Image (cartoon, rainbow, N blue to C red):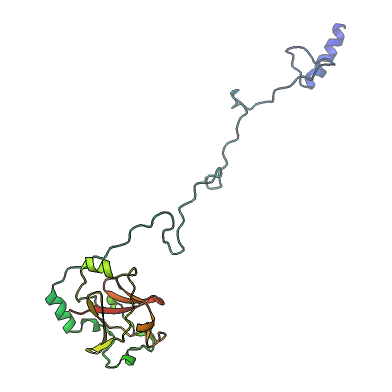
Amino acid sequence: MSLTALGLASPALADHGWHGGGGPPRGGGPPQQHEPQRGPGWRGQGPQQPPPQRGPGGGWRGSPPPAPPPRAAGGGWRGGPAPAGPRYAPPGRGPREAREWHQNGGWQRQGGWGRHERWEEHRAHDWRAEHRPWAQRGGYGGTYIPRGRFERRFGPEHPFRIYSRPVIYEGYPRFSYGGSSFLIVDPYPESWPVDWYASSDVYVGYDDGYYLYSRNDPGVALAITVMP
């Protein structure tokens, strides 16, 4: 082949990507593989990876972050063992102080439920309006159950049934359980049957004062006081 022919062929080969180095491809052999063009940041260690995607505000859009531990709708824990709740720890109060509070009817402060001599009269007309928690009565000032006995006999883990109709004492229903006597100083809801004491399981709980709860209606808490 003449030099003139080679001179004419070289520009055509350059336009098709050949740049020397081993000669132009010849017929009959496989076509020569051409290396891809690289950007200025490539250093020869594999293909250049695209940068991680980020959101408009800089937030990560790669693999999702680990999900937070599940919680109940109201914020209660549902992942693993529940955190320990507050234990029963009543404040110290001498028997004389508690007895004076009881004798003065300390639960009647700020519009507490009044005295009635018949059981039927302790049924509420509008319990939500007539009920008073201890916080609205100025706090509980009566006798406290010792911690060891409370944890053995009281709380939601120890339901019981009164069975007999509470006796009216000093104008309030009185019942006994777990080595203590109690006065119910709240009316019972109008939605409860008149003989709920015989048909419902109840328990005594503590929340800055004592309350009687029914398992049939756990949203209701009747304020009660421990007899001295």
Residue beneath the point at 83% across and 11% down = 7
Q: Is residue 75 left or right of residue 91?
A: right
Q: In this view, does 86 lie above or below 119?
A: above
Q: Is residue 33 above or below residue 96?
A: above
Image coordinates for residue 185, horizontal then vertical, percent = 27, 83
Residue farthest to the top, as pictured: 2
Considering depth in this image, is 2 or 220 the residue closer to the camera? 220
Q: In this view, does 46 lie to the left or right of 70?
A: right
Image coordinates for residue 21, horizontal then vertical, percent = 72, 13
Image coordinates for residue 149, horizontal then vertical, percent = 23, 68
Considering depth in this image, is 215 or 140 the residue closer to the camera? 215
Q: In this view, does 205 lie to the left or right of 5?
A: left
Residue beneath the point at 18% across and 81% down = 102
Number of numbered discs on residues: 0
Q: In this view, does 39 lie to the left or right of 154?
A: right
Residue beneath the point at 82% across and 19% down = 12
Residue farthest to the left, as pictured: 96
Residue beneath the point at 44% across and 58% down = 78
Give residue 40's quadrant in the image.
top right
Give residue 144's quadrant in the image.
bottom left
Give residue 162's quadrant in the image.
bottom left
The quarter of the image holding the C terminus is bottom left
Residue farthest to the front, as pictured: 163
The quarter of the image holding the N terminus is top right
Considering depth in this image, is 165 or 14 the residue closer to the camera? 165
Considering depth in this image, is 7 or 20 the residue closer to the camera? 20
Image coordinates for residue 139, horizontal then vertical, percent = 24, 75
Q: Is residue 159 above or below residue 194?
A: above
Q: In this view, does 116 lie above or below 207?
A: below
